[in-house]
Each structure stands twice: as structure tokens, then as C-alpha cells.
Amino acid sequence: MSKPTVTVLSGGFGGARFVDGLKRLEISLTCIVNTADDLTKYGLKICPDLDSVTYSIQDRFDETRGYGLINDSFVVDRLISHIKPQWFHLGDKDFRTHLLRTFKMLRGQSLTQATKSLASQSRGSINVLPMSDSTVRTVISVENCRLSFQEFIVKRRAEPEIKSIEFEGCELASPGPDVIKAVKESDLVIVGPSSPIASIMPILSINGIKEALIEREKPTVAVSPVISHKAPFTAAEKHRADLRAKFMSHFGLEHNPAAVAELYREFIDAFVIDSGDRMFAEAIGSSGVVVIQTDLLASSGTNRTLAVKKILNDSLNLNDTAEIV
Ligand code: FO1
């Protein structure tokens, strides 16, 4: 029997951790990744979310810091910071990725091609696709100025009040090659546990992606990035949760699993919550969405894979298709 094809929509931190659970399963996996928080620094193209997902597939993602590579050093960053203080810090091995990507693109490769070759040492049958090869940028307007995503969350520590959030360039952007095909044809599409506004909305803003999700006949499920019954364990998780809540609140959404499910309702068949958040199951289920419960807090390799495997089996069984072995 052929492996089920699974496509995940992903941002950086939450998506990368989810992909870590998926990567050991007998599936053919495609990750469609947000690029609206990309930036250029020292003339280098930096794609935080693409890198987080790729590093995670390669077992090199620094989950404690929440970005970059495990065991990286910051020698070059410190040297540069002596000349001029920096607010965005790049690890030495991480620098190599940005250099390689920039060189490949200067030689004419698209972001999709450069990403594919950077991910080429990854496990077989995992494709990492940027949402688009066009430039789309999250722009956050605050009092008196417009900030890029990184300027808002890193330089200004997400402190200013948000006046508006735009995904600049999305009207003219086309989905990357193979993106629509993956969304249309996969046995299962999973909207990963990434920030709904900062990571998933930019992907949905690209022409044709949301429409392709709505038209799917095979199952589409979303995984809650919000766990309401327990406070975040680590500083990185707390920081992400605060940011997510701030972005959701700008759109009038409460920071809970039911609000996320409601945001995705028009294209999902099922919504995954942590078992401890079962008090939200009735509200989510009342809108016709199937509720799947699993251990979304699972943090070790084996437990995480088991939790993700339950999501896949329950989701694929919505249409009585193959079971993951
Ligand atoms: N986040 C920070 O809070 N401070 C940094 O100096 C920083 C550097 C950095 C370098 C490479 C990279 O891929 C990500 C980096 N991030 C940093 C994380 C990034 O700002 C966001 O976490 C993502 O854009 C959101 O997914």
C-alpha cells in the first residue's frame, strides 16, 4: 500500500515542533511554510520559518531558544555587535544557511529551488515549500510608523499597540510551484499548531490557497496552537503564547482553542485540541467540526510521535482511508 500523502501548513516554532513528530511516520510529507516574516540582513536573505522547519526535519532545530540551530555559536554576531549594536542575532552555523540561500538566489534560483537544495540532506520524501516565490511581508502599523514583523516582535518586543496588520504584496503573489497541487491532492492537509494570525493567515492570503482548501474533498484538520488549561512551560513558549494572544486580540479573537477553530471553520473537517482542554469540545463540535483529542503537550520524541500518529489516524479515518502504521 502506498504511503498517505500529508501536507502541513506551518510557521516557525510551533510548526517545526509538530513536524518533528510527523517526520518519523510512514507518510509522504510536504510542508508549506510562511515566508511573510522573512527579512534581509547584511544583504542576506533570512527565512526564519523555512529554516525552523528544515532544521527540525534535520534534527538540528533549537527548540529551547525557539529558532536557529542547536549548539550554535555567536562569534560573528558578537564581532559585528562591537562595531554596531544589533537587535537581531544570527548564529555562526545559521549564517551559513543564509549565505548559501543568498548565493543560490543571486545565481538565479527561486526561493523554492534554494529551499529544496538546502533541505536536500533531510529525510527522504519530505518537501519543504515556501508559500510563494513572490515577496509578501507582514507589516504592522503602530502609532506613527509601520514595522516589519521582525521589527515589531524583536526590536520593539511586541510592546506597541497594534493599529493594523497587513500582508503586503499578497494580492499579486502566486502560490509557489506545487503548493496548490499539494493542497488539492494530499490525502490529508493539516493546519499546524502555528500562530493563526502571524503564520497561517499570510499563507491563506496567497491567491488560490484558501480556495483550494475549501474545495478539498479529502480531510483537512487544524491543530490548536493554544493550550488553555496549562501555563506555558518555557520562556520561549510563554513569549510565543503572549504574541499569539496579542495578534488574535487585534482581530477580536479570544486566546482559546474554540476561537482558533472558528477562524478555520470554513475549510476544516476536524480540530485537534489537547485532552486537558476538553471543556472546549462541545463549543467546537456544535459547529459541525469533529473534535480530536490528544496530548499536544508531549515534548519527547516518542511521545510526540505517538500524539501526532493519533491525529493522523483519527483524521484519515474521517474518510475511512489508510491507517498509519
Ligand atoms: N528572535 C529573537 O527574538 N531575537 C533574535 O535575535 C532572533 C534572531 C533570529 C535569527 C534567525 C532566525 O531564523 C530567527 C531569529 N529569531 C530571533 C526568531 C524570529 O524572530 C521569529 O521567531 C520568527 O520569525 C517567527 O517564526
Image: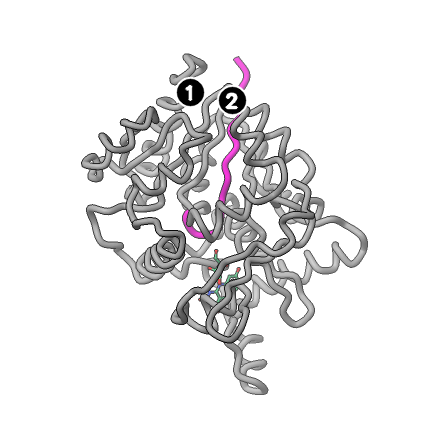
Q: Looking at this view, is 170 or 314 the one in front?
A: 170
Coordinates of residue 209 in the picture (x, y in percent): 58, 36
Q: CA distance from mark 1 to mark 2?
A: 8 Å
Question: Magenta stretch: residue 7 in it?
Answer: yes
Q: What's under tag 1, amino acid-wise? A: Leu
- The residue shown at (36%, 42%) is 260
- The residue shown at (59%, 23%) is 185
Q: What's under tag 2, amino acid-wise? A: Asp
Coordinates of residue 123 in the picture (x, y in percent): 55, 37
- The residue shown at (50%, 46%) is 201
Q: How many marks?
A: 2
Q: For mark 2, what is the residue?
A: 187
* Residue 167 as seen in the image, left or right of residue 320: right
Instruction: Identify whether 263 is placed above or below 247.
Output: above
**Where are the magenta residues, as a range?**
1-14
Q: Is mark 2 within 8 Å of ligand 1?
A: no
Coordinates of residue 139 in the picture (x, y in percent): 55, 61
Q: For mark 1, what is the residue?
A: 316
Local SS, label 1: helix
Q: Looking at this view, is 35 or 70 the one in front?
A: 35
Quarter holding residue 289 = top left
Graded by Cα atoms within 10 Å as few (under 14), some (14 to 19) or many (20 or more), the crowding at tag 1 reads: many
- Looking at the image, the residue that sits furthest to the bottom is 83
Mark 1 or mark 2, which has the lower sequence index? 2
Instruction: Identify whether 75 is placed above or below 61.
Output: below
